[in-house]
Every structure is written in C-alpha cells, then in structure tokens.
Image (tube, rainbow, N blue to C red):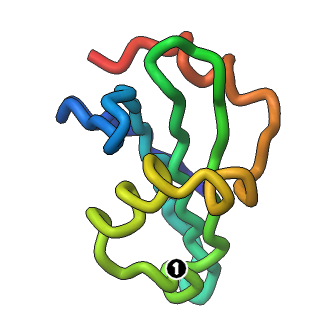
Amino acid sequence: MKDHWSYEKQKRFAKNGERWHFVHRTFYALAEGEDEPREIYFRNDDRAEFRVLRFERVQDNPYRDYETIVNKIMNNIPFRKTSIKQETASVWSKSWK
C-alpha cells in the first residue's frame, strides 16, 4: 500500500484564537478491494498537543465535509480528546514543502 502526505498551508484558527496545523495522509491500495485509510494529523501552534484522527475507510468518516471536521477538531475539546494520542510529534519533523 502506498501513501501520500499533504500539509495544509491554509492558516486555521480556533474560536479562542489558537492556531492549528493539519497534515493529511492518504493510503492508496495496490490491489482492488483493499481499504484505503485516511488520517488527519493535527497539532496546535505551540506544539503542546499532537494527535491523529484515523478512518479505516472513507465511508467511516461521519463528517463528509472537511471544513466541519476541522472546525470540530479545533473547537470541541472533548471530541479532540477522543482522537488517537500517539507519538505523532515525529510526523511534524518532515519537510512539507
């Protein structure tokens, strides 16, 4: 399975003024019928919080609208706390340019 990383260059701010950064990781199946997971990595500007939201299949994402899910991540702390908190800080050391 191949993957593609993409850093979102748009500046995003929560209602409280905190800046957030997002990276998308898309997997591409090499064989027909395989699932193609999607991951949204996110962090705040002061690098105090690193998390990832993962969907095993595109259909598993209940928020089809990307803007809706980004706003929910930035502004809904209980929702954000349900995402995976793994060692995702290393993802942010990649060069996105």
Which residue is depicted at the point 56% across and 71% down?
36
- Figure quadrant of residue 10: top left
Q: Is residue 63 left or right of residue 10?
A: right
Residue drawn at (59%, 67%), measured in percent from left and top? 37
**In the image, farthest residue toward the front:** 16
Quarter of image, res 55 = bottom right
Q: Position of residue 89 (x, y in %)?
A: 67, 20
Asked where in the image residue 9 lies, by quadrant, the reply is top left
- Image quadrant holding the C terminus, namely top left
Front position in the image: 71 or 91 = 71
Q: Nearer the viewer, residue 42 or 14?
A: 14
Q: Which amino acid lies under the numbered mark 1 shown in the image of this protein?
A: Asn
Give the crowd class for mark 1: few <14, some 14-19, many >=20 residues within 10 Å: some
Is residue 82 shown above or below 10?
A: below
Residue 73 lies, with reference to residue 91, above or below; the image says below
Q: Quadrant of the N terminus?
A: bottom right
Q: Position of residue 47 (x, y in %)?
A: 57, 15
Residue ID at (51%, 12%): 46
**Toward the viewer: 78 or 24?**
78
Q: Is residue 23 above or below residue 96?
A: below
Residue pictured at 53% horizontal, 62% vertical: 38
Label 1 SS: loop
Percent x, y for residue 73? 49, 53
Relative vertical location of residue 81 with respect to residue 69 in this rendering, above or below: above
Q: Residue furthest right?
A: 86
User: Which residue is tagged 1?
Assistant: 61
Residue lying at the far left of the rendered structure: 10
Residue closer to the observer: 1 or 74? 74
Counting from the top left corner in percent of width and height, residue 3 is at 51, 48
